[in-house]
Image: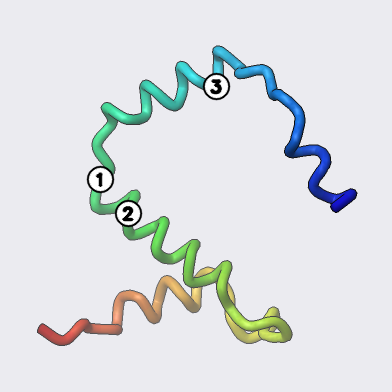
Amino acid sequence: MADRKQFLRDVEVDPELTKVLEDSKAKAVTEDELRQQRISFAFGNAPFGSEGRITKDSVRIASENIKLLP
């Protein structure tokens, strides 16, 4: 329970962060941004111990070759 005490207190809302979040709601995500997010997600979820074998570039190359079935 000691680890959770930090979440039991009231937190002051950062107005600058709130403005940035509100502004981001109106921004459309481009196909390239979405593709980069997918690559980053896949790279970030690579198994431990694969540091030398799986790189962000290898994920990017794999993403260009993998086709989804209809």
Q: CA distance from mark 2 to mark 1?
A: 6 Å
Q: CA distance from mark 1 to mark 3?
A: 23 Å
Q: Residue furthest left?
A: 70
Q: Residue furthest top?
A: 15
Residue at image position (85%, 50%) is 3
Residue 33 position within the rendered picture, expressed as x and y whole percent measured from the top left? 34, 49
Q: What kind of residue is marked 1?
A: Thr
Say whether residue 67 is left or right of residue 22: left
Q: Residues within 10 Å of mark 3 (few under 14, many from 20)?
A: few
Residue at image position (49%, 62%) is 40
SS at mark 1 in the image = loop
Is 69 or 67 nearer to us in this picture? 69
Tags 3 and 2 touching, CB below 8 Å: no
User: Which label sits on residue 34?
Assistant: 2
Residue at image position (55%, 22%) is 17
> Does 27 sit above or below residue 37?
above
Q: CA distance from mark 3 to mark 2?
A: 22 Å
Tags 2 and 1 touching, CB below 8 Å: yes
Q: Which residue is mark 3?
A: 17
Name the quadrant containing residue 43.
Answer: bottom right
Q: Which residue is mark 1?
A: 30
Callout count = 3
> Does 41 sit above or below residue 18?
below
> Does 9 sit above or below residue 58?
above
Residue 59 position within the rendered picture, expressed as x and y whole percent measured from the top left? 46, 75
Q: Quadrant of the C terminus?
A: bottom left
